Image (spheres, rainbow, N blue to C red):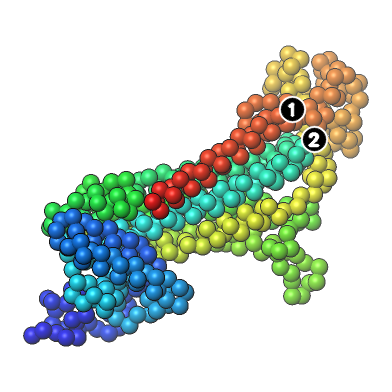
């Protein structure tokens, strides 16, 4: 007997008993996959084109369906509309929701769109479209942050600061050189995401539930319309593949790691003990108890939110581990982790503006770079140029540093007579060799902190960022064509 209670389902024909009410509510994914409405609409239009080419739909029917899909997208585009989708009383998922709305508008024609396809391929397609768009937005954010870092580097000009190893002062570097380290991280992150985008950019439509569509569909039609490189090569893999989600989330863990390292350094540098940087008031808060406080809330929240990215990646890895081919309901659980990482573009936008607003205490940084024997490496290099083996030079300068510590002076405060007790190689030119400029410029290698090298590195970084931004713009234009 026909079960009217189940008749609204996309799979109701084989069942007689209604679903347990609690289970039905528990297994619905519309509460989170409502975010895929735009992707579902785009994929539906592309499938309609393929059905038309296969003579399953007439041109008139195809036009009606595509127009109705566009109308549904427009109707629910607002925030209020999204709430209506999320809270729909009967839709199981975003695919079901769109079908219900099509039937409301077009009657039985709305049911024709599902000909030759499965929800397994639909969700695989929607998620690829979603992740592809997210990658583009994240790369835009990385480019904005990198640009802010470069601009800060240009403004810093020849300002110096101590570099650190083991959180101990190591050698003087240009502030711009330190900032450029984070530019390199951001550009690597963008490269990883571009690689991920290239690998995921294949279209599952036409894969059916597992074995391929049962109609002779031209799969290249939907692939072209959705701006995919090509159709996927294997229907079993296409419907069960979520590698791209895991790869995307893993790429985001690198973004998070690098943002967190930057956040940690800024948090430290903003303390009175360092005093290297003044926190922008627009991105800081005060204390409800201590009137003098200005707290680094943005950087602290960045450090904390990175854990959410790592958690999302680990969750997906555990969800996919050991799944037999092909589609399994477990895969529904991979969606929420990828949606939960949706805060990353906003975080990058904030950190870019925060970086642009930072004010460095150049005098304090310069003082720190010129005390604590940070020129000891340059001093050892001076002896190397005098023909002393580096290991021996290292020991001689170590002795000199110990004497300077005992006397309470820097290396430049030792007399030539005092220095010569460690070797006859010391001459009057030693003092010029360990001056700040010489200490910086002795690192005259690619990637070093010599002034001219850093100036060229800033220009090169700006060019690489511009090329990245241009590639994003080209992709956006291509996608909208």
Residue drawn at 20 percent across, 61 percent down: 59
Give the tally of numbered discs: 2
Figure check: 384 above or below 468: above
Q: Are marks 2 and 1 in contact (CB under 8 Å)?
A: no
- Does any portion of residue 142 appear in the rendered image? yes
Task: Classify mark 2: residues with Cα within 10 Å, few (<14), some (14-19) or many (20+).
Answer: many
Residue drawn at 35 percent across, 62 percent down: 39
Figure check: 6 above or below 152: below
Q: Nearer the viewer, residue 99 or 417?
A: 99
Among the 4 quarters of the image, the one containing residue 299 = bottom right
Whichever of callouts 2 and 1 sits on the residue coming sooner in the sequence is 2
- Does any portion of residue 253 appear in the rendered image? no
For residue 373, the mark is 2
145 sits left or right of 136 in the view? right
Provide the residue designation for mark 1: 441
Q: Position of residue 434 (x, y in %)?
A: 81, 27
Figure check: 371 above or below 33: above
Q: Position of residue 210 (x, y in %)?
A: 18, 57
Residue drawn at 24 percent across, 83 percent down: 20
Task: Classify mark 1: residues with Cα within 10 Å, few (<14), some (14-19) or many (20+).
Answer: some
For residue 282, the mark is none
Q: Regarding mark 1 in the picture, which secondary structure is present there? A: helix
Q: Quadrant of the N terminus?
A: bottom left
In front: label 2 or label 1: 1
Residue drawn at 30 percent across, 58 percent down: 125
Q: Position of residue 190 (x, y in %)?
A: 50, 46
Query: Marks 2 and 1, how far apart in space?
Result: 17 Å
190 sits left or right of 13 in the view? right
Q: Regarding mark 2 in the picture, which secondary structure is present there? A: loop
């Amino acid at each position: 007997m026909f079960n009217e209670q189940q008749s609204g389902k996309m799979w109701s024909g084989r069942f007689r008993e209604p679903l347990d009410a609690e289970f039905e509510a528990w297994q619905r994914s519309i509460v989170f996959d409502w975010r895929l409405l735009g992707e579902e609409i785009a994929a539906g239009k592309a499938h309609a084109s393929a059905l038309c080419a296969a003579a399953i739909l007439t041109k008139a029917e195809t036009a009606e369906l595509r127009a109705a899909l566009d109308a549904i997208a427009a109707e629910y585009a607002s925030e209020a509309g999204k709430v209506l989708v999320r809270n729909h009383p009967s839709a199981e998922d975003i695919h079901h929701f769109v079908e219900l709305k099509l039937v409301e508008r077009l009657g039985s024609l709305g049911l024709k769109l599902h000909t030759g396809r499965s929800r397994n391929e639909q969700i695989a397609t929607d998620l690829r479209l979603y992740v592809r768009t997210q990658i583009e937005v994240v790369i835009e954010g990385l480019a904005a942050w990198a640009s802010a870092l470069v601009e800060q580097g240009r403004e810093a000009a020849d300002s110096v600061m101590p570099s650190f190893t083991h959180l101990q002062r190591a050698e003087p570097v240009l502030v711009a050189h330190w900032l450029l380290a984070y530019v390199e991280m951001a550009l690597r992150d963008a490269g990883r995401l571009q690689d991920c985008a290239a690998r995921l950019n294949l279209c599952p439509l036409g894969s059916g539930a597992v074995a391929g569509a049962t109609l002779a569909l031209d799969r290249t039609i939907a692939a072209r319309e959705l701006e995919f490189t090509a159709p996927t090569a294997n229907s079993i893999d296409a419907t069960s593949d979520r590698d791209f989600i895991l790869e995307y989330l893993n790429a985001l863990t690198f973004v998070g790691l690098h943002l967190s390292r930057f956040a940690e350094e800024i948090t430290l540098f903003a303390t009175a003990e360092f005093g290297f940087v003044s926190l922008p008031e627009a991105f800081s808060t005060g204390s409800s108890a201590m009137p003098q406080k200005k707290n680094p809330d943005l950087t602290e929240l960045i450090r904390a939110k990175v854990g959410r990215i790592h958690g999302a990646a680990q969750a997906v890895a555990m969800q996919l581990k050991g799944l037999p081919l092909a589609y399994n309901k477990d895969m529904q659980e991979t969606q929420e982790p990828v949606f939960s990482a949706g805060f990353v573009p906003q975080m990058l936008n904030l950190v870019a503006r925060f970086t642009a607003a930072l004010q460095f205490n150049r005098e304090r940084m310069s003082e720190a770079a010129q005390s604590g024997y940070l020129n000891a490496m340059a001093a050892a290099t001076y002896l190397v140029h005098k023909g002393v083996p580096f290991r021996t030079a290292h020991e001689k300068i170590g002795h000199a540093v110990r004497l300077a510590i005992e006397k309470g002076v820097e290396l430049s405060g030792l007399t030539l007579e005092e220095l010569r007790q460690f070797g006859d190689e010391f001459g009057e030119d030693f003092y010029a060799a360990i001056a700040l400029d010489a200490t910086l410029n002795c690192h005259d290698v690619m990637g070093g902190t010599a002034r001219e090298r850093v100036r060229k590195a800033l220009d090169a970084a700006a060019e690489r960022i511009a090329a990245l931004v241009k590639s994003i713009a080209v992709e956006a234009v291509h996608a909208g064509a």
